[in-house]
Structure formats: structure tokens, C-alpha cells
Image (spheres, rainbow, N blue to C red):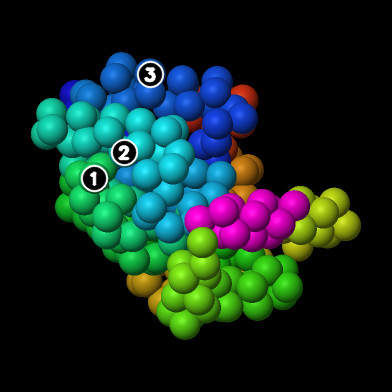
Amino acid sequence: MRATLFISDLHLHQTRPETSAAFFRFLRDDAIHADALYILGDLFEYWVGDDQLDHDPLSKEVANALKTLANTGVSIYFMHGNRDFLISQRFAATAHLTLLDDPTVIHINGSALLLLHGDTLCTDDVAYQQFRIQARNPAWQAGVLAKPYTERIALAQNIRARSDSEKATKSEIIMDVTIATVERVFAKYNYIDMIHGHTHRPMQHNHTVDNHVCHRQVLADWHDSAASYAIPT
């Protein structure tokens, strides 16, 4: 039986070759048997513009591996994460994948399913949400993309270092989803099931919202091993 697969938070980077190797094995051995693959953000540790394909061999290798998978008939979809929100049409065309809005509703086996990266659910982290608004601003993005490639790499590394430093002082609760926000999203989308990543806390959650039992699947990160969530089709 074929399946629809969901992955997120691989954070691929040349300094973690074991994660890249696990991803390529996953594409060859598992994803090739699927109907569709949904990548729900943070495929890369950072993305500084689609010309990264010209400078970073791993980025090009990933795009080519996805293209190879797509050419077998597997549909591939990508949703931006908080690390790779600058991925655009050139990468999508090279990898033969479709870019998705966050959030997006899909249908599998006649049932609706809500997909998100997950960072928009973490509304207690006010500082991050302020940065997210800035980083999704087209004018800000245009300003960043106008900089030389080396400057953009330095900027991404500085943002990553600052994020790691801030995480060390934030409570675990702030960095997880805000339940009231989750419940509002369930209500807005008519209580359909939800899948997201971002928090690196894989688990199946059940929420009762307005007398509806709602299911929320949190995807695993790939820092230790390959991980995916499958829905038979």
C-alpha cells in the first residue's frame, strides 16, 4: 500500500553529513514508494536565496535528489520553515516540487488535513513572532537578497547564533505551541486534523475544542535519525 509521507526539520547542512545521508537513503528506500511527499519546513539549516544552488554543493545535491524522486511519479510539496523561508521558484523548479502556503489544507482519503510548519502556533514567544513578521516582509526579503552572497551567509549565521543564544534563556513552555492558539486554529479550520513540525517534540496530541475531538500530529526533527509520518492511501 502506498502512502502520503510528511517530514520536517531536517536542518540539512554540510556540517551534519550523517543527516544528509539519512535523507538521501529515505528518498531512495522509502519515499520512492509513496504517492506524495510533504516537506513542512526547515529542510535546510538556512537558505539565503536560490543562488545558494550555485555556491553550496549540498543544496544542489538535495535539489537533484528530489528531482530524481519526482521523476518516478512521486508528487513533492514544500512549505517554508523558519530557517528556509527564502526558498523560491528557482529551487522549486530545479527540485520539481510545488511550494505551499502556510497553512494549507489538503485532502487524503476524503478527509481534510491542515498542514503548517508550526512556528505560527508558538505565540507565547513574542520576540520570535516579531522577527517572523519582519522576515516575511517582501521589502525586508528584497533587501537581504540584494546583498552579496557572502554577506547573506554571514547574516544567516548571525541569526542562527542569536537564536541559539536566546533559546538558552527561554523556558521550554515558551518555545512550544500555545494551546489557546492551537485551539483557535482548530476552530478556524472546522476542527480538522493538523500536522506540523518546528517544535522538535514528536507526539500525537488530542484536543477537545468546542466539544470536537481534534488530533494534532507533531513531526520529529532529524538530528538523531530519519523520521517521517505516513498516512496510507
* Mark 2 or mark 1, earlier in chain: 2
Mark 3 to mark 1: distance in Å?
20 Å
Label 2: which residue? 63
Front position in the image: 214 or 139: 139
Front position in the image: 188 or 199: 199
Front position in the image: 65 or 81: 65
Q: Against 203, is 23 above or below?
A: above
Q: Closer to the observer: label 3 or label 2? A: 2
* Mark 3 or mark 2, earlier in chain: 3
Q: Are marks 2 and 1 in contact (CB under 8 Å)?
A: yes
Amino acid type indicated by mark 1 = Thr
Mark 2 to mark 1: distance in Å?
6 Å
Label 3: which residue? 25
Q: Against 28, is 165 above or below?
A: below
Residue 79 position, x and y percent, is: 38, 56
Q: Is residue 218 left or right of residue 90?
A: right
Q: Quadrant of the N terminus?
A: top left
Query: Over which residues does the magenta segment extend?
Result: 149-161
